[in-house]
Amino acid sequence: GGGAGLAAAIAAGQQNKSVIIVEKNGEVGGDTLVCGAIYNTPDEALQKKVTMGDAVKRTIEAALAEAPKSGEHAALQAQVRSQWNAYKASGRTDLFDSKEWFALQTWNGGDKVGNLNLVKVLCYNAYDGLNWIDDLGMSFSDVISQGAGSLWERTHTSTMKMGTGFISTYVENIAKMNNVTIMVETTGKSLVKDGDRVTGVVCVDRNGNEFTLSAKVGVILATGGFAANGAMVQKYNTSGKWQDLSKVATTNRFSCSQGDGIEMAVAAGASLTDMEQLQLLYLGNLKDGQLTKYPPRDVNGTDQIIFINKEGKRFTNEGGRRDNICLAVFAQPDKVFYMLESGDGDKYKDIKDPDWRSADGFTFDYLESNGYIYKGDTLEELAGKLGMNVATLQATIDTFNASVESGRDEFGRTLYSTKLTKGPWVATPRQACVHHTMGGVTIDTSGHVIGTNGKVIPGLYAAGEITGGIHGANRLGGNAVVDTVVFGKLAGDTVVADAR
């Protein structure tokens, strides 16, 4: 009953198939409900409004200059190179993008670990997925941005808080469909097989009653990852990238992302891919690790904020990869940092405006009085509240502002839109938390689950974070929701196609 499962149900339901959604919680939504509500895809109409700077251009040149790792890599580079050369010859100054560049950047951003064919499915269908959910009633901002860890200005942001827009859109559509049923407080326990074919699911209701749902066409697993299962995270924390994660908080809802669907799939003979690839995110609040209670610019206003440690010093590229930022956070005093913003920039909203709300709907006064943010009308006032040397903090800001002018940054940042010059100054303390698991059930490019024998398991499909092989060693911010939409819809379409 998360984003991928709901998308799959609607896709199959739109083609007149009867669908039952099994949801173990009391309501649907999963971790999509509490996501950052960002969706990546090239969008020529919106990107025409963005001017492309020299630092951003160098990002493409560097990717095209890399020695290819395979023939597929070389072919994708060649496609992007042809597009890039045509862009330069045209004299355009707006932001370059294409589905091929999106795919290349996604694959590179995952350290070339992902299955490039799956990456292409994700990126080549992202724009169609956007239009599909838009047709269902989803509403996005008409301003393109660069979401946290997304690496490019192709992020579309929901007009509703967190993931409520995606989930409410799905729920409203399902309510109009007589052939789609939602069973809440019902837990899938195991898959039923007839020979090699999956034919149903054994379930338990909230009263402990066990029953079996038979599937005439197929079963789609969309149960999420395992980022909220500390023992499972630590079991697969073997890549060498991360320290002991057993005491690190998670951004996930504890009742979700327990890895139960993965265990069900394995018991049915499914193979697993990239289980050691774990992602942390640096946006967890200090009280419970959740992606809540932060100013709106901290997710999609990367061009207008900086990150500082407790000493008032920058320590990373704020627009960089999520794993690199989190590793840098772990190296800071107390493993804590502040997202610092000023009263500058077109994304600044007056903190005295009674309509000011955090990304999840809280007032500024609530966040400040409960210690989620700190404010100072002057830099000196803020430094005092944070226990920082104001001269050190001022020097940090002066150095950053010089980088805005020159386009060259000591940490390799490429995206700037404004200098930080005036108050009010707002600092939001954050920590790195376990966020996403890139590994999971092996699938093909149609969403079929692949068994340990390398063959498709008839009747079994998967979509969303339960799957592995798409994001590689690092998922780009804003690609998770794309994953749920593209592969969720794909799984639903494939089930229907297989039944014909």
Image: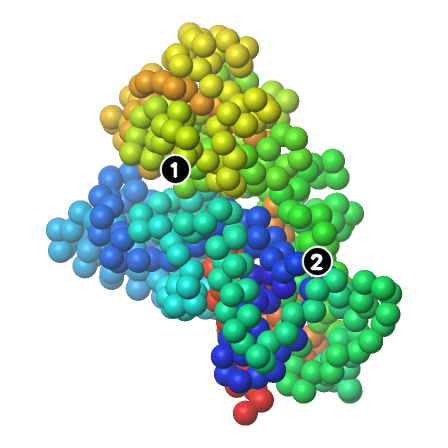
- Taking depth in this image into account, of 141 and 116 the one nearest to the observer is 141
Look at the picture and state if 59 lies above or below 304. below
In this image, 481 relative to 262: left or right? left
Q: Position of residue 189 (x, y in %)?
A: 79, 68
Quarter where residue 137 is shown: bottom left
- Considering the image in quadrants, where does the N terminus appear? bottom right
Query: Residue 301 got which mark?
Result: 1
The residue that mark 2 highlights is: 26
Q: Is residue 236 visible?
A: no
Mark 1 and mark 2: Cα distance apart in space: 34 Å
* Mark 2 residue element: loop
Q: Position of residue 422 (x, y in %)?
A: 32, 18
- The amino acid beneath tag 1 is Gly
- Considering the image in quadrants, where does the C terminus appear? bottom right
Instruction: Tell me the crowding category of disc 2: few under 14, some 14 to 19, or many 20 or more residues within 10 angstroms, Cα based.
Output: few
Going from N to C along the chain, the mark reached first, 1 or 2, is 2
In this image, 283 relative to 456: left or right? left
